[in-house]
Image (cartoon, coloured by chain):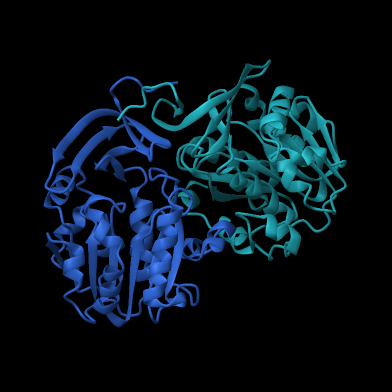
Chain colours: A blue, B cyan
Amino acid sequence: MSLNDNSWFTEAYNDFTAFSVRYSRKLYDETSDFQRIEIFETDAMGRVLILNGCFMVTEKDTFIYHEMLVHPAMALLETPRRVVIIGGGDAGAVTELVKYSELESITLCEIDPRVVSSCREYFPALSSGLDDPRVQVLYEDGAAFISRFQEEFDLVLVDSTDPVGPGVALYEMSFYQNIKKSLKKNGAAVLQTESPLFMADVFENSVKNLRSVFGNAGATPYLAVIPSYPGGMWSFTMCSETVDPTKGAPRNISGNLRGDLRYYNGEVHRAAFALPEFVRRML
Amino acid sequence: MSLNDNSWFTEAYNDFTAFSVRYSRKLYDETSDFQRIEIFETDAMGRVLILNGCFMVTEKDTFIYHEMLVHPAMALLETPRRVVIIGGGDAGAVTELVKYSELESITLCEIDPRVVSSCREYFPALSSGLDDPRVQVLYEDGAAFISRFQEEFDLVLVDSTDPVGPGVALYEMSFYQNIKKSLKKNGAAVLQTESPLFMADVFENSVKNLRSVFGNAGATPYLAVIPSYPGGMWSFTMCSETVDPTKGAPRNISGNLRGDLRYYNGEVHRAAFALPEFVRRML
């Protein structure tokens, strides 16, 4: 069949495969200084945020991405206090982080203020963490921001787009080195590192580069399923000089927080680090 | 963007979402007595088998589906000898099974001979297991076939299409009861049970019905990522009165077989049974 009428939004991946969603309404369309921002209302996936033609958020599955970006590291860090998020202007990661009462400071460093303002308007639940008094939002280049700190953060989250447009700087070695410098001794960083199935090169290079900075045992990929991202099988890489995510159990998530989670739990935490054979052989 | 030219094949799921792949050539198109069978050559996913408009096999990701249908149960059964596959005319499951020297008999019961013959021609590696002398192919209705046996099989695999067309009978209670009757005392069955994210109703009903037949502890869902299937997050359900897949370690897979696997390993086995919170709450 073909999707010829104009009520479908389609993301084609490298002109090879495509994922489409039928929408009932286009809510927002703006070309900011950095990228095109589109928001659609859809029956199947709820509201959908598209940046430069790529799915970033769908109300149907974004809980998987944001929970798996935030909670595995938070469950392993002993006394996390200060967190920074690079990118992540939809504020989904912020909203997961404010659930932890022990955090004192959550800094969102997003290059594009229009992503934040449009998500505040059209994704009020997803971005509700921005109202927390511990949250500070900075609109600047994340790579430049992180380069100014030394042993400052317990957790750095890199919630980037693909390595195109404003996302390119977030895949460079100097950025990885500056993240390491910005971390406290017992701190950790988590970066989204693309699909090992569809974007095998980006995944492989990202993990190899992170291992050259944090050491072989210091950069550990883990996986989650995110249907609206190309390949569905998505990777994150946890980096730390002291936290080994494959050893030691995750902390118990407190009852209140646990009730609020839809994907993450202790078993999912451990399972995420079990890599399929073809992924193990890439590394 | 739109995919208006005619070199894209698109599967739309319920007119809500769609997955498309660009093809270089259409290799096969036949309407058999049971369904439309199409085979495409694509750059991104290799050769692709489409039944009634739905992705069944892609050379890119079908190893995940077939390995996860076959190996978790084979790693838990103590002395498997006789296996039957209901559906599965692409023979990918057969090809995984013939890797086990301890199996004496592998019966493929597929309703549509044209699926088998077209896959033999266009997916020679995937269907190569059909040449093994232990394999017998029967062209008949799987539900009728299985109803004739009592304590006959160590393993029954249900490699069905979605619950439409020829697949409907493979989601009925009487079919589940007949599977149970056909199993030896220490036997097991594995059924593909659709996506808990996109086809939540089918998944939930299938598991509930299987639990009413095999008991609550006797039907255990597990997950794998299959990008070309709607929702990407795909479920299988293992059923047995004696084998508890969540307890006890899987057998070590022998060195020869292990080298041949691209997704499955012992860690992936255990990880597959870790269910995300939203799936646990459905059951």
Residue at the spot x=27%, y=39% of the render? A53
Q: In which quarter of the view is residue A143 placed?
A: bottom left
Task: Tell me residue A156's x, y (percent).
Answer: 28, 69
Task: Tell me residue A104's x, y (percent).
Answer: 20, 74
Given residues A150 and A14, the one toward you in this image is: A14
Q: Is residue B260 visible?
A: yes
Is A209 above or below relative to B197? below
Q: Which residue extends farthest bottom?
A: A185
Task: Tell me residue B116's x, y (percent).
Answer: 72, 29
Given residues B191 and A199, the one toward you in this image is: A199
Task: Tell me residue B267's x, y (percent).
Answer: 60, 64
Q: Is residue A58 visible?
A: no
Residue at the spot x=16%, y=48% of the render? A34
Residue at the spot x=84%, y=31% of the render? B148
Q: In which quarter of the view is residue B214 placed?
A: top right
Please count the marks in the image: 0
Name the side, left or right, on which B165 lies relative to B96: left
Is A225 above or below relative to B29? below
Name the side, left or right, on which B54 lies relative to B136: left
Name the side, left or right, on which B108 lies relative to A164: right
Is A65 above or below relative to B18? below
Given residues B169 and B71, the one toward you in this image is: B71
Q: Which residue extends farthest front?
A: B24
For the N terminus of chain B, the image quarter is top left
Residue at the spot x=66%, y=18% of the render? B34
